[in-house]
Image (spheres, rainbow, N blue to C red):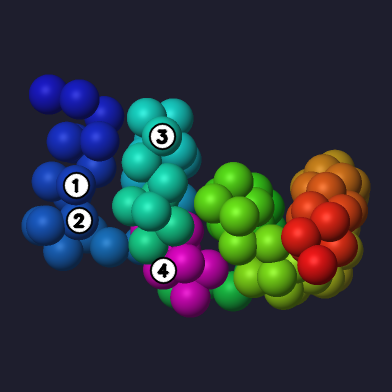
């Protein structure tokens, strides 16, 4: 049984949580199933709006699908969360992702 199978099984058993959704999102990203990853990452940040790592991965996944405007919104929220929590490294990484998304959005116009 794969990691994804195990995580999906936990979800089916009602063990839903932000961490489980984040883990599913991360695993789906590894297998280039970005749309499925986005579903789980969106749910992770809905379940725990203060989960900076989930915001970071969510913004990165949105950028990977070309949804740059949505990525900027998610990354701005994630940066604010990370800075509030003192998660400086996550905030720095999200600022880099945000700049890339902004450049891509500007280039598309």
Q: What label does residue 11 carry, if any?
A: 2
Q: Residues within 10 Å of mark 1 (few under 14, many from 20)?
A: some
- Alpha-carbon distance for marks 2 and 1? 5 Å
> Which residues lie in the magenta part?
40-46
Q: Residues within 10 Å of mark 2 (few under 14, many from 20)?
A: some
- Residue 43 is covered by the magenta coloring: yes
Q: Residue at x 44, y 30 (%)?
A: 30
Tag 3 or tag 2, which sits nearer the N-term? 2
In the rendered image, the quadrant that contains the C terminus is bottom right
Q: What label does residue 32 carry, if any?
A: 3
- Residue 45 is covered by the magenta coloring: yes
Mark 2 vs mark 3, foreground winner is 3
- Alpha-carbon distance for marks 1 and 3? 17 Å
- x and y percentages locating residue 38 in the rendered image: 44, 57
- x and y percentages locating residue 22 in the rendered image: 45, 51
- Label 4 belongs to which residue? 43
Say which element carries label 3.
loop
Q: In this rendering, does residue 75 appear at all? A: no
Mark 4 vs mark 2, foreground winner is 4
In this rendered view, identify the residue nearer to me: 64 or 109: 109
> Are the residues tagged 1 and 3 within 8 Å (C-beta)?
no
Residue 5 vertical placement versus 76 (above, below): above
Magenta residues, dominant SS class: helix
8 sits left or right of 74 in the view: left
> Are the residues tagged 4 and 2 within 8 Å (C-beta)?
no
In this rendered view, identify the residue nearer to me: 21 or 34: 34
């Amino acid at each position: 049984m794969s990691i994804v199978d195990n995580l999906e099984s936990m979800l089916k058993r009602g063990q839903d949580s932000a961490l489980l959704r984040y883990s599913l999102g991360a695993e789906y990203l590894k297998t280039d199933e970005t749309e499925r990853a986005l579903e789980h990452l969106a749910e992770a940040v809905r379940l725990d709006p203060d989960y900076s790592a989930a915001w970071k991965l969510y913004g990165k996944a949105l950028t990977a699908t070309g949804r740059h405007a949505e990525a900027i919104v998610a990354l701005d929220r994630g940066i604010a969360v990370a800075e509030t929590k003192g998660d400086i490294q996550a905030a720095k990484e999200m600022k880099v992702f945000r700049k890339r998304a902004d450049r891509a959005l500007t280039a598309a116009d």
